Image (cartoon, rainbow, N blue to C red):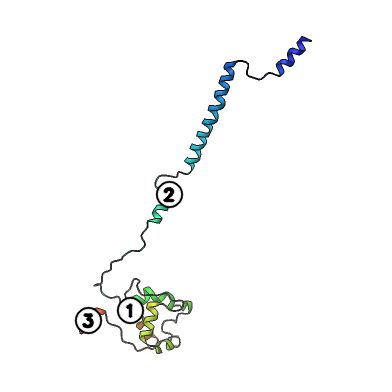
Amino acid sequence: MSNNSHDQHEAHTGPVKTPKQMLMLSIASFVIPVFIIIGLVFYVTSANKNAPGSSDAERAVAQRIQKIGSVEVRDANRPLKSADEVYKAQCAACHATGAAGAPKFADASAWGPRIKQGLENLVNSSLKGKGAMGAQGGGDFNDTEIARAVVYMANSAGGKFDEPKAVAEKSDQK
C-alpha cells in the first residue's frame, strides 16, 4: 500500500521541485511577456513606415503646403497667331464636328442667328463661355486671337465682320 500512496503523492506535485526552480520560473514568467510586448510594439510601429521619401505623412504635408495659384509670364510681344491657327488649335474640336450642339464650321443656317446678334456678343460668348462651350479667354491664346477665330468662323458662314486689330495696333493709331 505504501507504493500506491507514494504514486498518488507524486501525481499531485507540480513540475517545480526546488526553490531554485521556483525562482527561475518566476523570473521567466515576468521577463518573457515583457520581451513579447516589446517585440509586438516594434512590429506594429515598423509596419507604419514606408520606403524613404514616399511616406504618407510626407505626402500629406506636401499636399497641405502646395501652392494655391501660380503666375505664368507670357511674352506679350509675340506675334499674334492667325485666325486659322487658333481655330485649328482651340475651336475645331467641337466646331468641325458639331459636338455638343456647336455650330459647324461654314454652316450658314446654324451661324445665321448667331451672326445677327453681332460680333461683340459672339466674342463675349466665346471668351466667357456659353452653353456646353467653356470659356476660351485666359487660355493659350489672348482675347484678340480668340476674337479673330470667331470672325473667321462667322465669316466662313456668311458673316461680314472685320478682323479685330491687336490692342497695340489700336493704341498706335490714336
Question: Of the residues under marks 2 and 3, which one precedes in the sequence?
Answer: 2
The residue drawn where x is 55% and y is 30% is 33
Residue 140 vs residue 2, the one in the foreground: 2
Q: Amino acid at mark 1?
A: Ala
Residue 43 vs residue 116, the one in the foreground: 43
Picture coordinates of residue 158, whole percent (x, y):
39, 89
Residue 124 vs residue 111, the one in the foreground: 124
* Quarter occupied by residue 110: bottom left
Residue 57's label in the rendered image is 2
Is residue 24 visible in this depiction of the protein? yes
Question: Of the residues under marks 2 and 1, which one precedes in the sequence?
Answer: 2
Query: Mark 1: which secondary structure?
Result: helix
Label 1, residues with CA under 10 Å away: few <14, some 14-19, many ≥20: many
Residue 35's label in the rendered image is none
The residue drawn where x is 59% and y is 16% is 19
Q: Amino acid at mark 2?
A: Ala
Query: Mark 2: which secondary structure?
Result: helix
Dots 2, 3 in contact, CB < 8 A: no
Q: Amino acid at mark 3?
A: Ser
Circle 2 or circle 3, nearest the eye: 2
Question: Of the residues under marks 3 and 1, which one precedes in the sequence?
Answer: 1
Which residue is label 3 attached to? 171
* Quarter occupied by residue 170: bottom left
Q: Quadrant of the C terminus?
A: bottom left
Picture coordinates of residue 85, whole percent (x, y):
33, 75
Marks 2 and 1, how far apart in space?
49 Å
Which residue is label 1 attached to? 83
